[in-house]
Image (tube, rainbow, N blue to C red):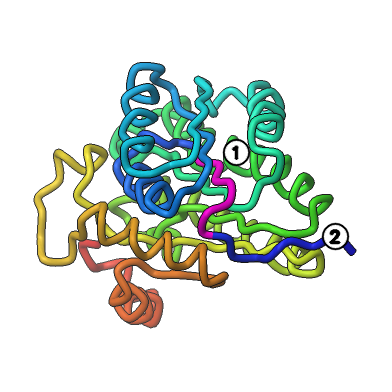
Amino acid sequence: MNRRPLVNHTGSVLIFGATSAIATDVARRFASGGATLFLVGRSEEKLSALRDDLLVRGAARVETAVADLTEIESHERVVEAAKQALGTLDQVLVAYGVLGDQRASETSVETTLRDWQVNATSTIALLTLLANELERQRFGTLAVISSVAGDRGRQSNYVYGAAKAALSAFLSGLRARLSKAGVHVVTIKPGMVDTPMTAQMKKGPLFASPARVGQDIHQAMLRGRDVVYSPWYWRGVMLVIRLIPEPVFKRLPL
């Protein structure tokens, strides 16, 4: 059987949503190890700047593709371009999403479905393609950014949380399926991160930097972890939240 090592620091890396703050940090860590990268994002200008940055940091080669990943019809084209450029998909990171506006979603079906399309439907569609490629390849790591918000629906962000819960459940089944082919699936569950997506939120002690979460993701991909809370203390925080009885929970301003 032609099987490659599961962990390969200097191999090929495919990143979707590459120009986000967290994904950029992960890309830089792989670049410093001499990896070859293929970056997918919506802004050609941002992708070009990131490509130059990664080459300076030590990347062997960096290719880019512009795509709006909410448009599911673009997925096959991008995955095929990545395969042609990289040869093999050693490390794959799916890192795009939108926090959304809970209040707007409560009054608009259109807004709710648009946010669901970004955070669940389009991501699951992309993962279906990637899973089939990696299963045929019979090696590799597929890491996906979900969220602690998916662990329990809270009144302050249940539309976002429900989409992430669906994504996490999908990844759980995918992990079991692909493990038989030597492919590892990593679910990343960050808590609150100080990024442009949370710019309007008041920052508290639980907020982490993109670098902290990027480091956790990079290590999880190299070590072949299953489910990673980032930073680590969110595992305990969410355990407490999940254990609150429903009659009490529905009265809490969470």
Which residue is more in the foreground, 107 or 146? 146
Q: Please, is residue 30 above or below residue 207 in the view? A: above
Left or right of residue 29, residue 207 in this image: left
Question: Which span is picked out in magenta?
Answer: 9-15
Left or right of residue 66, residue 48 in this image: left
Which residue is more in the foreground, 93 or 239? 93
Residue type indicated by callout 1 = Thr
Residue under pointer 2:
2
Whether residue 187 is visible = yes
Determine if the magenta segment contains residue 108.
no
Which residue is more in the foreground, 215 or 148? 215
The span from disc 2 to disc 1 (Cα, nearest Å) is 33 Å
| Residue at the spot 30% in from the left edge and 69% down from the top edge | 231
Residue type indicated by callout 2 = Asn
- Image mark for residue 121: 1
Q: Please, is residue 148 above or below residue 94 in the view? A: below
| Residue at the spot 26% in from the left edge and 61% down from the top edge | 212
Question: Can you say which quadrant of the picture contains the C terminus?
Answer: bottom left
| Residue at the spot 29% in from the left edge and 42% down from the top edge | 21
Determine crowd level at label 2: few under 14, some 14-19, many 20+ residues with C-alpha closer than 10 A.
Answer: few
Q: Secondary structure at mark 1?
A: helix
Residue lying at the far right of the rendered structure: 1
